[in-house]
Image: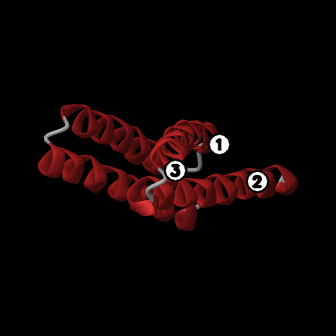
């Protein structure tokens, strides 16, 4: 659980930094608000994952699905790999990692 929690925390940090950069470079308040909102939710789920809560893994998975959908849509619209394409790939990697962790948890029960 500790590894999953750490990885989700790192992902949350990246989301937060991206929101702040979006605000500073483009003056985008929605980027800042979304970055703060999603990163706080991911940090909270990361904490709950570290305490062994299975529901927190599902919450992190759901949040990551939402973010991946957003970044994939953005990439398809702009065709700029940085930042949307890269974040889409990172989100996909997170989805796979969390889903495999959930699967492993169920196999152990």
Q: Nearer the viewer, residue 7 or 66?
A: 66
Callout 1: helix, strand or loop? Answer: helix
Q: Is residue 108 left or right of residue 17?
A: right
Measuring 12% from the left and 50% from the top, which residue is drawn there? 24
Measuring 61% from the left and 61% from the top, which residue is drawn there? 93
C-alpha separation, residue under disc 3 versus residue under disc 2: 14 Å
Q: Is residue 98 above or below residue 56?
A: below
| Pointers 1 and 2 in contact (C-beta within 8 Å) | yes
Q: Residue furthest bottom?
A: 3
- Structural crowding at the residue carrying mark 2, measured as other residues with C-alpha within 10 Å and reported as few (<14), some (14–19) or many (≥20): few
C-alpha separation, residue under disc 1 versus residue under disc 2: 8 Å
| Pointers 3 and 2 in contact (C-beta within 8 Å) | no
Measuring 41% from the left and 57% from the top, which residue is drawn there? 9
Whether residue 96 appears in this view of the structure is yes
Q: Give the labeled residue for mark 1.
A: 54
| Pointers 1 and 3 in contact (C-beta within 8 Å) | no
Colouring method of the image: secondary structure
Quarter of the figure with the N terminus = bottom right
C-alpha separation, residue under disc 1 versus residue under disc 3: 9 Å
The x and y percentages for residue 18 are: 30, 53
Label 3 or label 2, whichever comes before in sequence order:
3
Q: Is residue 36 above or below residue 109?
A: above
Q: Give the labeled residue for mark 3.
A: 51
- Structural crowding at the residue carrying mark 1, measured as other residues with C-alpha within 10 Å and reported as few (<14), some (14–19) or many (≥20): some
Q: Give the labeled residue for mark 2.
A: 105
């Amino acid at each position: 659980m500790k590894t999953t929690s750490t990885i989700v925390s790192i992902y949350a940090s990246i989301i937060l930094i991206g929101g702040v950069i979006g605000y500073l470079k483009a003056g985008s308040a929605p980027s800042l608000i979304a970055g703060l909102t999603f990163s706080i939710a991911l940090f909270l789920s990361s904490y709950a994952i570290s305490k062994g809560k299975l529901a927190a893994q599902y919450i992190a998975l759901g949040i990551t699905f939402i973010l991946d959908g957003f970044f994939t849509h953005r990439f398809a619209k702009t065709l700029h790999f940085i930042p949307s394409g890269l974040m889409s790939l990172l989100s996909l990697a997170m989805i796979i990692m969390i889903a495999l962790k959930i699967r492993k948890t169920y196999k152990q029960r």
